[in-house]
């Protein structure tokens, strides 16, 4: 059995549509992960600041 030109065109359109949908899904996933990384980075910076403040308080109380 040979594939007709019409059949091949339909298959190409379906594959193209599937690829476009997959690309959109992956784009959404990447945006979500990027936001999560950003949020975690902000939390880490806040924790680092708090640790440094605690370290300074500790050093002041203990005369270091």
Image (cartoon, rainbow, N blue to C red):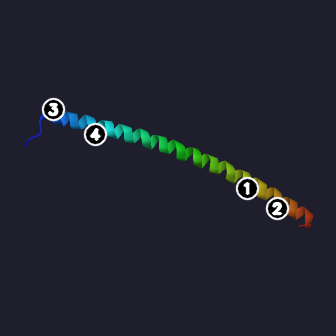
- Residue visible at 44% across and 43% down in the picture: 26
Which one is earlier in the sequence, the residue at label 4 or at label 3?
Answer: 3
Q: Are marks 2 and 1 in contact (CB under 8 Å)?
A: no
Q: Which residue is mark 1?
A: 48
Position above or below: 38 against 12: below
Q: Secondary structure at mark 1?
A: helix
Which tag is nearer the camera, tag 4 or tag 2? 4
Q: Which residue is mark 4?
A: 15
Q: Which residue is mark 3?
A: 6
Position above or below: 54 against 7: below
Looking at the image, residue 28 sits to the left or right of residue 64; the answer is left
Q: Secondary structure at mark 4?
A: helix
Which tag is nearer the camera, tag 1 or tag 3? 3
Which one is earlier in the sequence, the residue at label 3 or at label 2?
Answer: 3
Q: Are marks 3 and 2 in contact (CB under 8 Å)?
A: no
Q: In which image quadrant can residue 50 be found?
A: bottom right
């Amino acid at each position: 059995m040979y594939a007709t030109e019409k059949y091949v065109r339909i298959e190409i359109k379906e594959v193209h549509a599937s690829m476009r949908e997959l690309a959109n899904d992956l784009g959404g996933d990447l945006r979500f992960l990027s936001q999560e990384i950003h949020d975690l980075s902000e939390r880490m910076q806040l924790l680092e600041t708090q640790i440094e403040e605690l370290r300074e308080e500790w050093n002041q109380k203990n005369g270091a």
